[in-house]
Image (cartoon, rainbow, N blue to C red):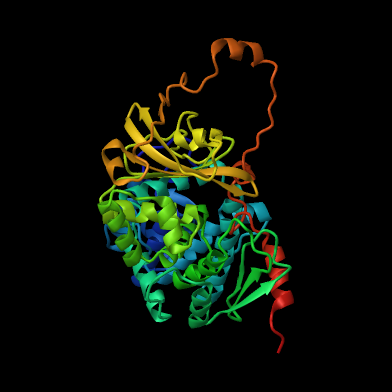
Amino acid sequence: MITADRSATPSPDLAESSADEVDALTLGRRIRDRRAARGMTLGELAAAIDRAPSQVSAIENGKREPRLSMLRTIALALGTSVDELLRADAPSERAALEIAVERAQRGPVFAALGLPSFRVAKSMNDQTLQTILSLHNEIDRLHRERAATPEEARRANAQLRAEMRARDNFYPELEAKAAELLEAVGHTGGPVSHQLVADMASHLGYSLHYVGDLPHSTRSVTDKRNGRIYLPTQQSPSRDSRSPILQALASHLLGHEEPAGYADFLRQRIETNYLTAAILLPEQAAVRFLTEAKNLRRISMEELRDAFAVSYETAAHRFTNLATARLGIPVHFTKVHESGTIIKAYENDRVRFPSDALGAIEGTTMCRNWTARTVFDVEDRFSPWYQYTDTPSGTFWCTSRIEKAKEGEYSVSVGVPFEHVKWFRGRETPHRAVSRCPDPACCQAPTGLADRWADASWPAARTPTSLLAALPTGTFPGVDQTEVYQFLEAHAPRD
C-alpha cells in the first residue's frame, strides 16, 4: 500500500519496502518498462523528477518504495498514470520471471542455504531463470512439507470430508471410469475375479510380479518406466488380494502425479479407494442388488459383501457411495479401533461425531454407548450386531461388525436415522442405548471411581501408530522412499 506519510525513512520521498505493502518489485519493473518504452535513460528520468540516479535505481530494483507524491511525479515524467504503475501484473512474461527470481532471492530459502544474491542480468536467458526458480520452488516445497503440522493434516482431512458430504460421497466421474475398464475386459456380471483383475492390468500395459522382498512400508510398488506392478508373495488373510492391484491401476487411470501436499495425498487416496470399490462392486449391479434388497426391506452389509465376494469394510464403504445418490437413504459410516479411537468416519444424516477445534474427527474418541463401541462387548463375533442409539440429534440405528488387522481389532459400522431403518435387516433388534455426547458427563467415569483412581493410574495407549504420527512426513506419508528406489533398482529388467 502506497502511503502518504511515514516517519524515519532514508529520504523524504522514499521508504523501505516490506511484505505488507505494495509489491515493490512489480512496481519497479513497471516503472523501468515504461521508461525503456519512452527511450529514457536512468539519468534522464532521475533529472526529470529531481532525484539522484541511485534513488531511481533503488525504486526500479524494488529496494525502495516511493511515496504517493513521488509516484505522481514519476507517472507524470513517464506520461502515464499512477493507477497504471500500480497494476498488480508484471509488464511482460520476462519481467514476471525476473520478479519471481528476485523474490526468491529475498525469501527464506536462499537465507537458510546461505546462498549469495545475484543481479538478474539481461544476458541471462529465460531457461536459466526458470531453472533457478524451479529449483527454489522444489526446495521451498520440501521445507514446507517437513514443517507441516498435524493440525494442517487434520484441517485438510476436515475440508475433504465436507466435500464428500456435499456430494453425498458419490463421484459419477469415477463410476464412469470403473464401468469403462470393466467393459474393456469383458466383465458381464458376478464377482470380479482375480484373473479379471490381472486382465485389467494387462489391458493397461502392466505386468504383475510377486516378490518376497517388497519394501515393508508398502502394499505394492509400481514401476511406471517398465510397466510392472510388484506385489507381496505372502498375502494378508485380512486383506483382499485384488485390492492392491486395483489401487495401483487406479492411480494410473486417474493420472495421479506426485502429491503436492498432504491435502493432495488425501484426495488421491480417497479417489483410489473409491475407484477400487467401484470396480469390485460395479455401480449398475450393486444398485440393482441394493434396490431389490430395499424393496424387500432387508438391506444387509453381509449380503452385499457375499454377493460381490469383497470384505465387509469394502461393502460398507461402497454402500455409503450409493445409499444417498441411488437409494435416497442418508447414512453414516465409522471405523473405530478397539481403544475407542475413530480411524475413519463419514456422515450426511445429521449424526454428530466428536471432533476437535479444526473439525477433524479421526483421532477423537467415539462415545462408549454407540454401536461402534458396544459391539466390542458382544460375545457372538459371527453374527451382525444391531443397535438403536438415542442422541441429542435424534435416534439412529446401526449395524456393526468386528474386523481384525495388525493394529488390533476394529469395528466397521453403518447407520441411518430412525425413519430409514425400515429398509434394513435387523430393524427388530431390542438393543438400545442412550448417548448424551458431546456432553462430557456421558462417558465420564462415576465420581467415586474417578476419585479413587485419577491420581493412581498411568495407562499406555494402544491407539494405532498411524494416528500418533506427526503427519505428514514425506511425499507419500509412511513410505520409505529410499527403500522403494533401492527395490526398483534391484528388480528393474536389465538390457
The residue that appears at 47% across and 21% down in the rendered structure is 440
Residue 48 in the image: x percent, y percent? 36, 59
Residue 32 in the image: x percent, y percent? 41, 64
Question: Do we see residue 116 in this rendering?
Answer: yes
The residue that appears at 30% across and 36% down in the rendered structure is 418
336 relative to 129, above or below: above
- Picture mark count: 0
Residue 223 in the image: x percent, y percent? 61, 75
- Along the line of sight, which residue is nearer the eye, 413 or 401? 401
71 relative to 341, above or below: below
- Along the line of sight, which residue is nearer the eye, 291 or 338? 291
Q: Is residue 460 left or right of residue 394?
A: right
Quadrant in which the C terminus is drawn:
bottom right
Q: Is residue 437 left or right of residue 486?
A: left
Quadrant in which the N terminus is drawn:
top left
- Along the line of sight, which residue is nearer the eye, 249 or 443? 443
Residue 133 in the image: x percent, y percent? 54, 66
Q: Residue furthest bottom?
A: 495
Residue 81 picture quarter: bottom left
Question: Do we see residue 173 in this rendering?
Answer: no
Q: Is residue 214 left or right of residue 19?
A: right
The residue that appears at 54% across and 69% down in the rendered structure is 248
- Along the line of sight, which residue is nearer the eye, 72 or 292? 292
